[in-house]
Amino acid sequence: MLTLKQIYDDKARVIAGLEKKHFAGAAEAIEEVLRLDGERKAAQQEKDAAAAEMNKISKSIGMLMAQGKREEAEAAKAQTGALKAQIAEFDAKMSEAEEAQTKLLLTIPNIPYDIVPEGASAEDNLAVTIGNWPNQPMIDAIAKDGAVALRDWNAEVDEAIAAERIAQSEKLPHWELAKKYNLIDFDLGVKISGAGFPVYIGQGARLQRALINFFLAEANKAGYTEIMPPTVVNAASGYGTGQLPDKEGQMYHCEVDDLYLIPTAEVPVTNLYRDVIIDEDKLPIKNCAYTECFRREAGSYGKDVRGLNRLHEFSKIEIVRIDTPEHSDASHKEMLAHVEGLLQKLELPYRILRLSGGDMSFTAALCYDFEVYSEAQHRWLEVSSTSNFDTYQANRLKCRYRRAEDKKVTLCHTLNGSALALPRIVAALLENNQTEEGIRIPKALQPFFGDDMIR
């Protein structure tokens, strides 16, 4: 949630940031926030004046009684009663204005950093890093200032890549490989739960477990403390990290108990620090968690939902950091390097995108997506979003730290990222590593899988 200080200090920057995110009615929303704050302040001033007057009159009542001025004392008592009623009215006005202001602020997204590119859609994202990629000369030819706009990439690169790959071989998509090697049964998942709930079998289940253990081991080596949180949360937790009210329709809601199935471990892990004041010397806090994640994915259809491309339930390892404003940029870069290192060790072709204002999440101030290339589908698959939320989540959570220098209590920065989400990693591993003998397991994963091939 944006802070009032942000808005008062630089209203024009806040409005420009919201417009960069293509938030409709940005100026009107901010003006309404300020109007409601003005109402609250006016009611506060009237309350304070009435309270001061009531205290003054109250002090005189004893003196009047001592002087035998009973009628004047009774009149003074009546005045204090009237003032007390007025104070209650002013309290109600303050609460009403504050409640309306908070309700409005919860619907206003975070503002992006200046480094975030302008743009309304994914085509305006910038590819800032390409790794394990055989077509680097083609990328370099169209790169500008070290980055490639996806609009240019889509026009010049993907079409050529697809044509080249199709000419070279006809690789099987992962859903056919899953059937061939009896790794995943999508029909059984439909029978048990519905579409988007696959059943992993034998070597497929072992591959899932190997990836989970590999990702957790790498997070542990990087200094992250493992957390095993609940996979259902209350509404306060959803509001704390910004999934509510923005993504309410995409979350599974247990209505009887008013609990939500988590869309990501970000929600319970970040909420560990709701209403907490942390000493500065304890920062940065680095946590990781493996959980199942649940998303309704309402409105999804077409080729994007085939096989493992888009699921209602999936496994994911999340990394979460709580940090100071001064160090959060360095933390973000370390997180990006960590996720990139995982993809390098899995030997998958990848690219890192800096998302444009129009393609960013509601809560992020800066977000990088990681995508891996699918050899059989001839398309890029998102496997991680790694974001800095600045103080936006911390303000909702009341997650603060006490500065060592002056003991002042101020808002933390929160950050998180997928490290990594399994479904599309599995899809790329199967498709990119298929051979006549079976599916090759990357060297870094072999100790966890227990073999060098799926046969």
Image (cartoon, rainbow, N blue to C red):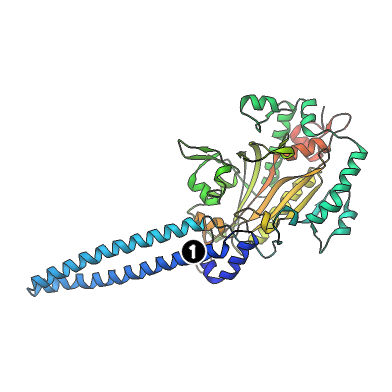
Q: What residue is at 44 percent from the left and 64 percent from the top?
A: 36
Does residue 259 sit above or below 385 in this rendering? above
Q: Amino acid at mark 1?
A: Val
- Seen in the image, is 405 located left or right of residue 159? left
Residue 402 in view (yes/no): no
Q: What residue is at 80 percent from the left and 26 percent from the top?
A: 180
Location of residue 108 (image quadrant): bottom right
Q: What residue is at 86 percent from the left and 55 percent from the top?
A: 139
Q: Nearer the viewer, residue 350 or 309?
A: 309
Residue 358: percent from left, percent from top: 67, 56
Residue 12: percent from left, percent from top: 59, 70
Residue 346: percent from left, percent from top: 79, 42
- Seen in the image, is 399 located left or right of residue 48? right
Does residue 414 sit above or below 86 in this rendering? above
Residue at numbered disc 1: 33
Residue 276: percent from left, percent from top: 49, 54
Does residue 386 sit above or below 7 in this rendering? above
Residue 116 in view (yes/no): yes
Name of the residue lying farthest toward the left = 68
Name of the residue lying farthest toward the right = 168
Q: How many marks?
A: 1
Secondary element under disc 1, as helix, strand or loop, is helix
- Seen in the image, is 304 located left or right of residue 84? right
- Seen in the image, is 218 located left or right of residue 243? right
Query: In which quadrant will I find the C terminus?
Result: top right
